[in-house]
Image (cartoon, rainbow, N blue to C red):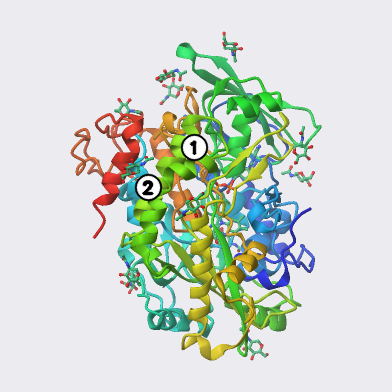
Amino acid sequence: MRAVLPALTLAALSLPFIAAVPSDAQDDFLRSERALYRRNIVTDGSIASSYDYVIVGGGTAGLVLAARLSEDANTTVLVLEAGDTGEAVQDKIDIPVYTYYNSLVGTSYDWAYETVPQPNADNRQIAWPRGKVLGGSSAINGLYLVRPSEVELNAWAGLVDNGSIWAWNNLYAAMKSSESYSPPSTTVQDTAKIEYANSSHGFSGPLHASYPGYMMSQVGDWEPTMNAAGFQTSANPDGGEGWGAFVATSAINPANWTRSYSRSAYIDPLPPRSNLDVLPNATVTRLVFTNATDGNITATEVQYASASGAATQSVQVSKEVILAAGAIGSPQILMVSGVGPQDVLEAAGVPVQISLPGVGQHLQDHIYAEVTWKTNTQTSASIYYANYSSNPPDVSSPFLSFVNSATAYVNFSSLVSAPQTYASQIAANVSESAATLVPSQYSEVIEGYKAIYNLTAQTLLMSSIGDMEILLTLTGSGQYNPQTISIQAALQHPFSQGRLYINSSDIFDYPLIDPQYLSHNADLVLLREGLRLCRDIGNTAPLSSVMTEEISPGSSVNTDDEWETWLAQNFYTEYHPSCSCAMLPLSQGGVVDANLKVYGTTNVRVADSSVFPFEFSAHLQAPTYGLAEQAASMIKGTFVNLNSQTNSSSTSTKPSTSASPSPTGSVDGKSNGALSSRTPVFPSSAAAAALALLAAFVL
Ligand SMILES: Cc1cc2nc3c(=O)[nH]c(=O)nc-3n(C[C@H](O)[C@H](O)[C@H](O)COP(=O)(O)OP(=O)(O)OC[C@H]3O[C@@H](n4cnc5c(N)ncnc54)[C@H](O)[C@@H]3O)c2cc1C
Ligand SMILES: *[C@@H]1O[C@H](CO)[C@@H](O)[C@H](O)[C@H]1NC(C)=O
Ligand SMILES: *[C@@H]1O[C@H](CO)[C@@H](O)[C@H](O)[C@H]1NC(C)=O
Ligand SMILES: *[C@@H]1O[C@H](CO)[C@@H](O)[C@H](O)[C@H]1NC(C)=O
Ligand SMILES: *[C@@H]1O[C@H](CO)[C@@H](O)[C@H](O)[C@H]1NC(C)=O
Ligand SMILES: *[C@@H]1O[C@H](CO)[C@@H](O)[C@H](O)[C@H]1NC(C)=O
Ligand SMILES: *[C@@H]1O[C@H](CO)[C@@H](O)[C@H](O)[C@H]1NC(C)=O
Ligand SMILES: *[C@@H]1O[C@H](CO)[C@@H](O)[C@H](O)[C@H]1NC(C)=O
Ligand SMILES: *[C@@H]1O[C@H](CO)[C@@H](O)[C@H](O)[C@H]1NC(C)=O
Ligand SMILES: *[C@@H]1O[C@H](CO)[C@@H](O)[C@H](O)[C@H]1NC(C)=O
Ligand SMILES: *[C@@H]1O[C@H](CO)[C@@H](O)[C@H](O)[C@H]1NC(C)=O
Ligand SMILES: *[C@@H]1O[C@H](CO)[C@@H](O)[C@H](O)[C@H]1NC(C)=O
Ligand SMILES: *[C@@H]1O[C@H](CO)[C@@H](O)[C@H](O)[C@H]1NC(C)=O
């Protein structure tokens, strides 16, 4: 059974399922204008028989790669996307508030996955929405743009050989190159008390990053309330300082108050390109391989079908296959194609091409729960239902652009009373946890669990890094209970890791998703304490002046046991599944190397949110855009490693000083020529190298 969200949890990022079904044909003018944007989208199913690059998945990362790789007119690029174009429901993609109250979550534009029953969630099967449409999850998400912190990206860089490609300097540059930032209007900035630094932003990238055109006054209460509760404001949240309280940027185009997502940002503005085809309604069913030398395999063909049972079609690949099917789709495609854990593949009846035990493993997610109050003020829900829900949506209305993004990332020490003692207990538990909590028989996967665990344990006492997101939600509890305000706590660095796996060779049978939520006790303790903090913050002025009564969980929940019992029934995903094709050494159950290449293949990469090796204290779309920009420049050979000058163990490659059309500059066209090399690190010591790198950031 699908877990239906109870009304009380329909806040912020839990997009309501309640959907009045308005007419889709409200604005013929817009519709005909949109028709102009179909230039590179194939609507009659006819494509060429062979392409240089076949990108699997036209989602957040996939369309970035498509636009960037097809900049080279001599390179042919095909995108195969399982979902439709989205044009029939364009308003539900474009108009920010409208997408919250008329969400595509739960419709045919959502894969609507769910987890297997979770023992620590009262055996609930938790809904895992994912966009199934051009733009992927960027077309249906909550629009938040939040970047990881500098320490997290540098820690990632330390996990794999040649990982400096992914260090802060480089991914920061890539995230900037993806965006065009517009500061808030003076009124919105003053109302919400927004702080920002222009130097942390890009101004000529495809994705619009800005703020709504309308601001609720309660957002302006957030930072003073957090300050009164003992937390600082982050003056530069997008510059690697993502802790403290701030108002996040949103993926909004201030020219017409629409959502900016990978399709509208990267594909629609392109002129017709004869070397680019984007094919919707094309679910990739399998990659076909031939044997290369050294036991590696080479993908030569991609098979796809329009629906389950429809005829399979195929297209040849002359250079590379790039998987960008997301944290669920990418590992599933590898597995049905014979690349994955041998035990899983054999049980599903899939012939093993490459035994790669980490595929689908190391699965991590952010989970949240929330404390809710009745309020005597307006919320975005009360305004929406009173003023806007009965009229056709008007993109030009500033109110309809409202996305509340007042948030904060607080540290471990703010959550528990004896942080040093508790942190060392957690750190000491790595072997015991690895021995009991890893859902794999393969030693490599267990080593990877330890590496991620150890790194996470090491960050607990650090400054400059958040551990729990605390998020204000003014979205109300849907139409029937709009007069509520909630504060959410969302666990950012879980010690619990799960897996997803196939039990069928048919791509149309959903994989089984088992995140093993709260299997590690520290996750439960931290989330419980995060919720206590939410209650304290809601009782702190000035925000407390608009809260009339706590209605959930309410006054009957106070002790640890009471919170934990309540939590089991009331946490949900924050929609950030990741790490299922983790970039780690092969000896740690890695799936891709630092160049995003799938181990054992000569020409298959994964470039999407599945490759992050651990969860960041951030929402995932900003790092996914950065990753995709970086992947594209890597594949094009124009990548410049900004870390190579300061990294003593790197090559002497210097960033190009000449002006370049490439987002991150250009070196002389040699494929991957600019990647730095670190002193070779044996995989078993990669975790130690990561920790040494992290240790440098401890105050
Ligand atoms: C409801 C919701 C709210 C969210 N809110 C936020 C937010 O506010 N801020 C934020 O930063 N992040 C948010 N996220 C998370 C963020 O959107 C995702 O982490 C990110 O977009 C993932 O990008 P991706 O490229 O990895 O995958 P996706 O964007 O999901 O793209 C994968 C694409 O591959 C396609 N695909 C899958 N399998 C196949 C196949 N077999 N053949 C062909 N195509 C296939 C899919 O249809 C999809 O288009 C939210 C996510 C959801 C679902
Ligand atoms: C995709 O399939 C749906 C359902 O069959 C159909 O309505 C739609 O027109 C198709 N889209 C394209 C671009 O072919
Ligand atoms: C275009 O690509 C082809 C095949 O990949 C190659 O032979 C040719 O030299 C390229 N031309 C240019 C101008 O780069
Ligand atoms: C950012 O740049 C804009 C445009 O130049 C300018 O109006 C604004 O004052 C700048 N803001 C800050 C905080 O520097
Ligand atoms: C909003 O503006 C962008 C260009 O900045 C355009 O691509 C998009 O189609 C517009 N959307 C609507 C609904 O007008
Ligand atoms: C590759 O070679 C192995 C061993 O010879 C064989 O079992 C396998 O089927 C081959 N795979 C492909 C894709 O040809
Ligand atoms: C909603 O409608 C009320 C009553 O007409 C009006 O006073 C208020 O300004 C409107 N609010 C918004 C945000 O449109
Ligand atoms: C250590 O692991 C054991 C077994 O998984 C668990 O019971 C205990 O709570 C853990 N301790 C900490 C501090 O997480
Ligand atoms: C975890 O990291 C510490 C160093 O901080 C190291 O001493 C320990 O051996 C590591 N444990 C494992 C299991 O990797
Ligand atoms: C944790 O956060 C609190 C509150 O912002 C701050 O006072 C403290 O210095 C932080 N601790 C570390 C280790 O940074
Ligand atoms: C695979 O798992 C699903 C969900 O548990 C189940 O319905 C289905 O019967 C399983 N299929 C096989 C072949 O075991
Ligand atoms: C595949 O190729 C890589 C180098 O590209 C090599 O190190 C490896 O041993 C080869 N064989 C397998 C099975 O990965
Ligand atoms: C790291 O980069 C160097 C230089 O490009 C290369 O020789 C080496 O094989 C790379 N190592 C890995 C594991 O990719």
> Which comes sooner in the sequence, label 2 or label 1?
1
Disc 1 CB within 8 Å of nearest ligand 3 atom: no
Residue at the spot 70% in from the left edge and 66% down from the top edge? 16
Viewer-proximal residue among 511 and 255 = 511
Q: Position of residue 70 (x, y in %)?
A: 49, 37
Viewer-proximal residue among 414 and 155 = 414
Q: Position of residue 167 (x, y in %)?
A: 33, 46
Res. 455 mark: 2
Disc 2, SS:
helix
Q: Position of residue 609 (x, y in %)?
A: 51, 46
Res. 201 mark: none
Crowd around label 1: few <14 · some 14–19 · many ≥20 (10 Å): many
- In which quarter of the view is residue 2 placed? bottom right
Residue labelled with disc 1: 70
Residue at the spot 52% in from the left edge and 56% down from the top edge? 521
Quadrant in the picture for the C terminus: bottom left
Amino acid type, residue under disc 1 in the picture: Ser
Residue 255 visible, this angle:
no
Residue at the spot 46% in from the left edge and 88% down from the top edge? 541
Cα–Cα gap, marks 2 and 1:
38 Å
Quadrant containing ligand 13 reads top left
Q: Is residue 360 above or below residue 320?
A: below
Amino acid type, residue under disc 2 in the picture: Leu
Residue 332 visible, this angle:
yes
